[in-house]
Image: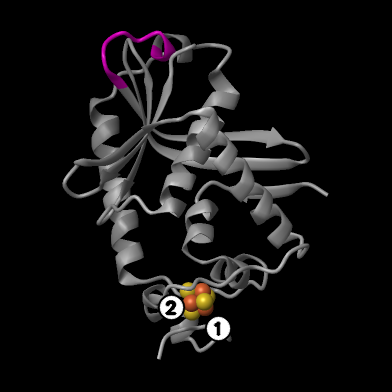
Amino acid sequence: METKIYASWLSAHGYCEYKFYLQYVEGVEVPRTVEMQTGSEIHESKEEDFLKEAEPATLEEFLNSTKYTITKEVFLQTKFENNFLMGKVDEIGIDKEAIYIIEDKPRARAYDGVKNQIYAYCYLFKRNFSDKTPKPIYAILRDRDSNIEVWKEAFTLKNEFILQNNLNRIKKILKKEIDPIPTDNQKKCMACIMHKLNLCKHSLAR
Ligand code: SF4
């Protein structure tokens, strides 16, 4: 059976595998917070501002840009083995030298899960367009509010391997072939909605 995996799940998976399991396998609904609602509104407003300024271009024109050019909110998907990986990239930049896959997050910190989410977007770009451009791909995390890049790394084969390992674990968790590992970080449990809802038997929070 085909499995759909969303790039954003890599971030949730990196926070805590057990939380990921509760949310995406057991179907526990996470209440929408004020912060999430504000985040969506800021996102939409930035996209509207972009669309006011943007000039239409073909894919070929974009991929052949030598001057720094961006596009936003790009939905990509690819099939790997018997699975679909998909996701919407916040921003893709391109210049003479390279491709820049950019994720905007509030209070951006380069946690492993966030890096894996951005690697997933890089992988999606590579799978869709590597035959059209040989430019190297960079993964970038940017602070949504300050617009400062807080992490930037080339998308290498080593990073692709790390991504594949995580995708494989996610696939096996979704199919209940392996047990999800709960975090050993008490601070994560203290901030976790599953702890607050009293739904986690592994919580380390007191
Ligand atoms: S309370 Fe801790 S162990 Fe449980 S799901 Fe949340 S982060 Fe994971």
Which residue was labeled with disc 2? 189
Sequence-wise, which precedes: disc 2 or disc 1? Answer: 2
Q: How far apart are labels 2 and 1 at the CA level?
A: 9 Å
| Closest to the observer, 151 or 82 | 151
Question: Ligand 1 near label 2 (Cβ, under 8 Å)?
Answer: yes
| Label 2: which secondary element | helix
Question: Which residue does the image show at 66% across and 73% down from the upper left?
Answer: 26
- Type of the residue with mark 2: Cys
Q: Is residue 30 visible?
A: no
Residue 111 rendering spot, x and y as whole percentages: 38, 54
Residue 144 rendering spot, x and y as whole percentages: 25, 48
Question: Which residue does the image show at 50% across and 60% down from the upper left?
Answer: 12
Q: Is residue 56 above or below residue 149?
A: above
Question: What's drawn in magenta, residue-wise?
Answer: 62-69
Question: Which residue does the image show at 60% across and 35% down from the upper left?
Answer: 77
Q: Is residue 89 visible?
A: yes
Displayed quadrant of residue 89: top left
Are the residues tagged 2 and 1 within 8 Å (C-beta)?
Answer: yes
Q: Quadrant of the C terminus?
A: bottom left
How many circles with numbers are drawn on the protein?
A: 2
- Type of the residue with mark 1: Cys
Question: Ligand 1 near label 1 (Cβ, under 8 Å)?
Answer: yes
